[in-house]
Image (cartoon, helix red, strand yellow):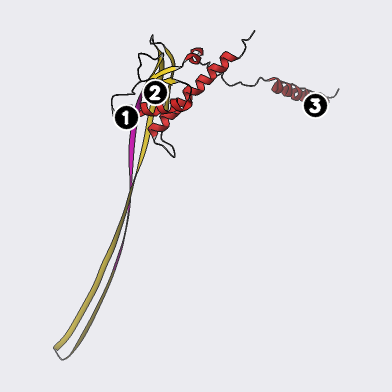
Amino acid sequence: MSMGKCALLAAAMLLVCGAAFSQEKPKETPPAEQAANPRLVKVKRICVQKFGEDVLGAQAQEMIIAKLFESHRFTLTENCEKADYVLKGSITERTERTYRSESEGIGFGRSAAASESSGSGVTRSGTAAAASVRGDTHESLSSSEVKEQAAVTMRLVDKDGEILWAASLESTGGKTKGAIGDAAERAVRKFLRDLERAEKQNASPPKP
């Protein structure tokens, strides 16, 4: 067999081996989502505590109570001693204000002068006149923008103080609600999603 044919055969074998290797390469699988706490399915009676002693904490508490009530999944009570589970948390808010200023100016001017003289010998007489006009305009534009950011942290504990669930959500606000309301709503939605995951886990048959 000639050297040229040997080279062609070797190149063909490399291509076949490379294609087979690329086909057999295992695909990367995304990391599995952490299983939800199975005890969440037992949560029926909840008390929502204040998220702080200030007005902001009371406001967040009222928003979360309203969202949980809309789900029609729990019995809500304000007496935490009678509740099986207590929802606790905290909320922080940060406001940033940025300023922008622009200015522009226009100046203009005009001047004119005239003179006349007459005389003979060493004697001269004359008149002179001058006039000038100046003006300027100045315009300034300024604007400000306020950006809000809120973070809500929640945890669900039982009567013994054991934490069943915890989450922290941030928001810069939405089209129809501010940063605090949007962050509180996101936290409640995550809590309900994790509860549904726990229910599906319990309903699925155990793996052999």
Question: Where on the picture, by quarter, is residue 115?
Answer: bottom left
Residue 122 located within the stretch drawn in magenta: no
Closest to the observer, 3 or 150 = 150
Q: Label 3's element?
A: helix
Residues at marks 1 and 3 touching, judged by CB atoms closer than 8 Å = no
The structure residue drawn at horizontal position 44% and vertical position 29%, both measured from the top left corner, is 185
The residue that appears at 43% across and 26% down in the rendered structure is: 169
Q: Residue at x 70, y 20 (%)?
A: 24
How far apart are the alpha carbons under marks 2 and 1?
13 Å
Mark found first going from the N terminus, 2 or 1: 1
Q: Is residue 44 left or right of residue 208?
A: left
Secondary-structure class at tag 2: strand
Q: Amino acid at mark 1?
A: Leu
Q: Main secondary structure of the magenta part?
A: strand
Q: Earlier in the sequence, mark 1 or mark 3?
A: 3
Vertical position of residue 143 compared to residue 130: above or below: above
Query: How many residues crowd mark 3 within 10 Å: few (<14), some (14–19), many (20+)?
Result: few
* Residue at numbered disc 2: 153
Residue 68, given in percent of the width and then of the height, sits at 44, 25
For the record, the magenta segment spans 89-108
In terms of image quadrants, where is residue 175? top left
Q: Amino acid at mark 3?
A: Leu
Find numbered disc 1 in the image and state the secondary structure of the residue it sits on.
Answer: helix
Residue ID for mark 3:
8
Relative to 128, does residue 145 appear above or below in the rendering?
above
What is the quadrant of the N terminus in the image? top right
Queried whether the magenta region covers residue 107, the answer comes back as: yes
Kindly identify which numbered label has been placed on residue 56.
Answer: 1
Q: Which mark is residue 138?
A: none
Q: Which numbered mark, 2 or 3, is in the foreground of this view?
A: 2
Rendered image quadrant of residue 202: top right
